[in-house]
Amino acid sequence: MIAHTLGPKFLNNFAFLPASQTRGGILLVASEDYFLISDTLNTVTAKVTMRADASTWWITVVYGPQSDADKLLFLQELKDLAAADRERWLIVGDFNLIYRATDKNNSNLNRRLMGSFRATIDALHLKELRLNGREIHME
């Protein structure tokens, strides 16, 4: 499927987590010409080596769970991943959590989960890369 969709340069350079019940799957793919993906862990976390200069960094692709109890376990999982002391680390994906009320498109807020997510972001020293051109619909 990868070769058919993306071409042969992506065929041997990917990591994935299959879909399970209502949870979406994750696919991390990079061109073999520029990057090497290796060391896939239990989540879709991969060590990426840039072929041009051999610099390395880590990427974690996430799709957060739906239930509140699972979200707290997910936040702990992120903290556990960070404990591996990855010097350069990028986390991308859908966390299914918000850390600011302004990110919510309605007034149904779970402030306890917002606080837990914010505390995790702070503890891991993460920085948000804002989406440019994102439409926000307020109800």
Image (cartoon, rainbow, N blue to C red):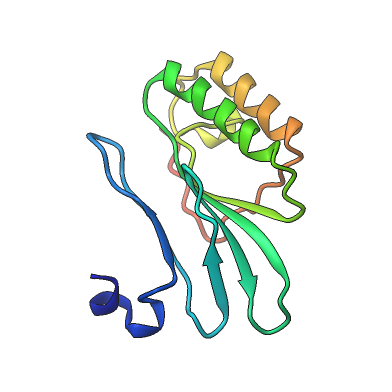
Position of residue 25 measured from the top left corner of the image (x, y, whole percent): 32, 48
Q: Specify the quadrant that holds the N terminus.
A: bottom left
Q: Nearer the viewer, residue 13 or 130?
A: 13
Q: Residue furthest front?
A: 39
Quarter of the image where the C terminus is located? top left
Reply above or below: 89 against 31: above
Q: Is residue 16 left or right of residue 118?
A: left
Front-most of residues 83 and 114: 83
Note whether 5 is above or below 52 in the view shown.
above
Q: Quadrant of residue 55?
A: bottom right
Question: Where residue 76 sits: x, y (%)?
Answer: 58, 26
Residue depicted at 30% across the width and 37% down the height = 23
Residue 124 drawn above or below residue 11: above
In percent of width and height, residue 86 lies at 72, 49
Instruction: Depth check: give the residue in front, 49 or 59.
Output: 49
Name which quarter of the figure residue 113 lies in.
top right
* Front in this rendered view, residue 77 or 115: 77
Q: Left or right: 62 with respect to 21?
A: right
Picture layout, residue 76 above or below residue 7: above
Q: Residue at 68% across / 34% down in the picture?
A: 121
